[in-house]
Every structure is written in C-alpha cells, then in structure tokens.
Amino acid sequence: MAAYDYVLRAKDHHHKHTKEDNAKAIEMAQKAIELDPNYSLAHAWHSCSLGQALGAGYMAEETVVERIRKAENGLAANSQDDAECHRILTELNLAFHRDFDKVRFHQDRAYALNPNDPRIVSQRGETRMWLGEAAEAIGWIEKAMQLDPSEAERRAKHLGQAHYVARQYQEPSSAPRVGHAQHAYLAACHAALGNETEAAAETALVLESNPNYSIAAALKRAPYALESDREHQRETMLKAGLPA
C-alpha cells in the first residue's frame, strides 16, 4: 500500500506539468520501486515522468535517455497484462526506438485491455498517424474527444495534425492555434492549398514564438514510419517559408 501511495503521488505531480512537479514525480516513482521492485505501475510512471522531463527540456537529453533505458527494462520485465504499462511502452518504443512492430503490439494490447480509456483511444489515433494510417487515426482521436470532453481542446491539436498528415488541408484550420508546432502545421496546410498570405502569417507566428525553429529539428522528433509522410512534411513546410 505504501508503494501504491507513492505511485498516486507520482501521477499527481506528473499531471501538473511543471519542472518542480516533474522532479517530484520521478522521486515518488523511484520510492515506489524501492519498496516494490516488481510493481509494474511504479515502473510505468517512472518511465513516463522521465519522458516528460525529456520532452519539456527539464533534463539533459543524455541523462534522460540513459535513465529511461534502465526504467524501461524494469517496466518491460513487469508489465504483465496492465493497460497502463502497455500504453507507456507504446510511447517509449515510438519516441526512443522507432520500433513500429512493438508500437503496434503494445498499443493493440493496451486497447484490448481497456478500450474505453480516452488516453489509450487517443494514443490509438496518434500512433496510427505515425504508422502511416492518418485517415484512420482521425476517427480514433474524435472518439477520445467524445469519451473525455474535458481534454477535447488539447486533443484537437492531434486531430488537426492527423488531418494534415492525411492531406486533408482544409480541416486543421479549425484546430486551436496553440504553440509554434500547431502554427507550423497550419502554415504547411495553407502552403499546400496555395494560400501564400495565410501561410506567411502562420510562419511569422512560428518564428515569433520560437526564433530557432527548424524543419530538421521538427522532423527529428517526428516518428514517421513512412518516408513519404516525412517528405510531405518537409516539402509543405519549406513551401510555407519555414527554415530548413
């Protein structure tokens, strides 16, 4: 029960999305693992919080990657039939290994174990987008938005991206304009449609919020399974005037 309490604390801190809370989430998950080394959820939230640290830039990449590999070994050895563990193994294989067979396996397993979890349903859409099945991804993300309306606005960004990857350029224009990444996708959509003025306006917003933005850096973080999807993003963003 003490290990379970630490996992609950880790989850609470993880979802607050601050640097200080991220550090506390990692600490709480580690304490849970110390109390119960075979506790799958403790390994899951330890790995997830380390991934959050990397994505948010809270730790140096080399440090996080090394620690995530150790955490992932513990998670894989103790995942059993836990939907949450399979959900996080999906993310780790997508982000760090680009092992698309394992991505599909773990996501299918997570969904089979808990088909009504909006996070798993949304992930099903997001992974389908990266796997080259963007048209199918759209329906899954829309379903997740229906299952959890409180997260609908955040997932609308993923929905807009899925429409873009599916070459449905008119649809992302209704997605929330939050963050430079979303403006970059909108710039690319406008460029693909030949809307030069709108594309230039979105590109300006990208560079205003992130003067160091580059297509190469964005593509490095994009785990596309198909080279055609990668080239599609490169070409449309270049056409929008975004820096290579």
Image (cartoon, helix red, strand yellow):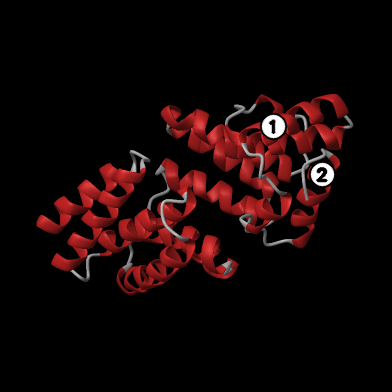
Residue 203, above or below 166:
above
Helix, strand or loop for disc 1:
helix
Residue 210 at what x, y percent from top left? 63, 39
Where is the N terminus found, in terms of image quarters?
bottom left
Left or right of 159 in this view: 74: left
Residue 164, above or below 128:
above
Of residues 149 and 197, the one nearer the viewer is 197
Amino acid under disc 2: Thr
Residue 137 at what x, y percent from top left? 62, 46
Of residues 24 and 121, the one nearer the viewer is 24
Mark in front: 1 vs 2: 2
Q: Which residue does the image show at 61% across and 53% down from the upper left?
A: 128
Helix, strand or loop for disc 2:
helix
Residue ID for mark 2 = 236
Which mark, residue 172? 1
- Find residue 36 and report its image quarter: bottom left
Q: Which residue does the image show at 66% across and 51% down from the upper left?
A: 218
Amino acid under disc 1: Pro
Left or right of 143 in this view: 27: left
Residue 156, above or below 214:
above
Residue 87 at what x, y percent from top left? 42, 56
